[in-house]
Amino acid sequence: MSVTILYTVITLCVIGIAAAVILYFVAQKFKVYEDPRIDEVEEALPGANCGGCGFAGCRAFAEACVKQTNLSDLNCPVGGNDTMGNVAGILGLEAVKTDPRVAYIRCNGTCDNRPKTNTYDGAATCAIASSLYSGDTDCQFGCLGYGDCVDACDFDAIDLRANLGVPLILDDKCVACGACVDACPKNLIELRKKFPKDRKIVVACRNEDKGGVARKACNVACIGCGKCEKECKFDAITIENNLAFIDSDKCKLCRKCVSVCPTNSIVELNFPPRKIKTEEKEECQTEN
Amino acid sequence: MLKTFKPGGVHPPENKISAGKSIEVLAIPKTVSIPVSQHIGAPAVALVNRGDEVKVGQVIAKSGGFVSANIHSSVSGKVKKIDIIPDSSGYPKSGIVIDVEGDEWLEKIDRSEELVKDFDLDSKEIVDKIMEAGIVGLGGATFPTHVKLVPPKGMKAEILIINGVECEPYLTSDHRLMLEKANEIVVGTRLLMKAMGIEKGYIGIENNKPDAISLLTEKTKEYPNIKVVSLKVKYPQGGEKQLIKAITGREVPSGGLPIAVGTVVSNVGTAFAVYEAVQKNKPLFERIVTVTGKSVEKPSNFKVRIGTAVSELIEAAGGTPEDTGKIISGGPMMGKAIAKTDVSVTKGTSGILIIKDEESKRRETIACIRCSKCVSVCPMGLEPYLLMTVSQKQMWDAVEANKVMDCIECGSCSYTCPSNRPLLDYIRLGKGKVGQIMRARKN
């Protein structure tokens, strides 16, 4: 009995050792060299695998970084300049600074501003609703409000605001990965330059209809009048297809366009309240 | 034993309220808005300008490519504008708006009701006339007929099937046409057979229309090569592939066209339009539209000029009932709800259905209970529950691998689902996406 056990143990040990030896040589023979820096770079990345860099996850991005001799085309929007600085340090390359960006939904067509003209009771996703028809208001360009962007966001950075009809992007959580940009069937979401204190001035509208039609559909629609374009000293505003667009890279946040907009379609966010100059003047005049 | 297709199919309540109402000619409206894209394929290119005088039957937009069709004026008058006009989906479509003045037809059009039975044209001449008249499939898919009549190289059509099934509940436009224009449809069928050099023709009709079956059987007596086939009632028998299966037993291969099994299918409405185009020189500018619904005052079948606003049809049928929930262009199974009634009747509008509020609401969606009812009713042998799930998860490879492109969008799965799941909505989404991916791969 004990002999049988002994033989078994010995046989297994011999097989094990033989297999180990074979495996060792095979492993040597077929060894795949992998740059150790890939692991280091991957370690430095946020590990969100969001795809915001344009690659299939952080590992793929790390591989791409290691292959490059210049980091100017690569950027991890989640980690921002800090992470890219670390990556550049590991690779011994020069870090390229990019302006941090933030997503913004260019529609202000909340229930108050944009009356509903019909009811939709199909599957509650923007993709399906927009493939069936133009939407439950007269604006065919505006937000549908079913929250495909909310589902696409891996960072909980979008608040659906179902009672208002248009979701809100929370600037402090948004990492500008661009997942919502792809998810929106109406192409409403834009990645804009992030200004200090999350200040922004945006044309919150995508309506390309003629002025009258746009205005009828929504109180805060851009009618393409061009007043903002004339007012802007920095050439940041362009009008195309009856619609104004503010280039965030050129905008200096002077807020002049906001006050000339006749439909209030240009919104200013996170600014301190304005001093009301005109009223003060009037008061002064009456006193005199 | 009556013929039908297998597998799948459902039996929705027929509700053919307007079946007994003969076709009425709807008064010509004051203005018409004619979209330049009323067919599958490239939009037509407008030929007229603002202020031009047009006559009934005049070409106002020329076919914009190989798969495209001419558009003719349905009224006489002055072109008011060429602009973006409302479309049933709400998205902008280019169209021609004409202010009506009188009713002056082109001289070449034979307006008499007299039946012209004989023809002495070769196949090319017939196809050219059909192309000139801008005829498209009037069953709803609006595929240009002249393209269908010229099979791809190496394929030969042996059988022509005229589709008089009208399996959509509520709709009766084809039924009425068969009863009132049976002789013309038979001539149209012969013309289509001649155009393709086909020897054998079938007219498929479901046996809920016995009057049409007996009438057409009688009218086709003198033509032994045209046979009327009575079919067992089952939705979606009017689907081209289902009808081929029911009548000939042949199965169109996945991704293939009916011509792959030697068949060509045309609607009875198309056959009638072909008769009018070839024998009467009348282009396609009017069609039969059913206006119906349970609370509609006067459910009717109207002969309508293309471009008439849907609101005028509803007005003629007694106005919008108070309990209206949805207005659908087409039938209840495959039709699409329209958001506004100022949209135009196009070549593909087979009916306007007004659904009561209490019947129009979707019920609450609950979890899939794996009953597989959707699988057993799918006429294409697909697995709708699976397609919905993979489409929801955006796994487009899996959507494609599960043959989403074979879906005919009949809606049997959504109709039968006990959990009220929006199966077809998601399948259609997946189909659109996979279609895009496939086109991108080709280029």
Image (tube, rainbow, N blue to C red):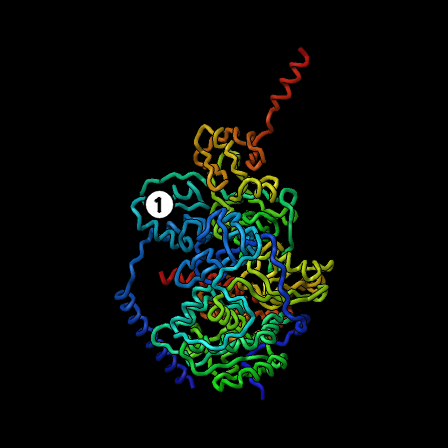
Who is closer to the viewer here, A85 or A36? A85
Task: Give the residue furthest to the right.
Answer: B322
Query: Element type at marker 1?
Result: helix
Q: Is residue A127 among the parts visible in the rendering?
A: no
Q: Amino acid type of disc 1?
A: Asp
Whole-percent x, y for residue B171 in the image = 62, 70
User: Where's the C terminus of chain A, which quadrant?
Assistant: top right
Q: Which residue is drawn at 52% across and 72% down?
A: B272
Q: In the picture, residue B153 is in which quadrant? A: bottom left
What residue is pinned by disc 1? A73
User: Where's the N terminus of chain A, which quadrant?
Assistant: bottom left
Chain under label 1?
Answer: A
CA neighbours of label 1 inside 10 A, class few (<14), some (14 to 19), many (20+): few
Q: In the picture, residue B169 is in which quadrant? A: bottom right
Task: Give the residue furthest to the bottom.
Answer: B1
Relative to A220, say whether A34 is above or below: below
Q: Which residue is drawn at 49% across and 38% down?
A: A244
Who is closer to the viewer here, B397 or A88? B397
> Total marks drawn?
1
Whole-percent x, y for residue A203 in the image = 52, 38
Whole-percent x, y for residue B377 in the image = 58, 76
Relative to B330, say whether A213 is above or below: above
Who is closer to the viewer here, B91 or B218? B218
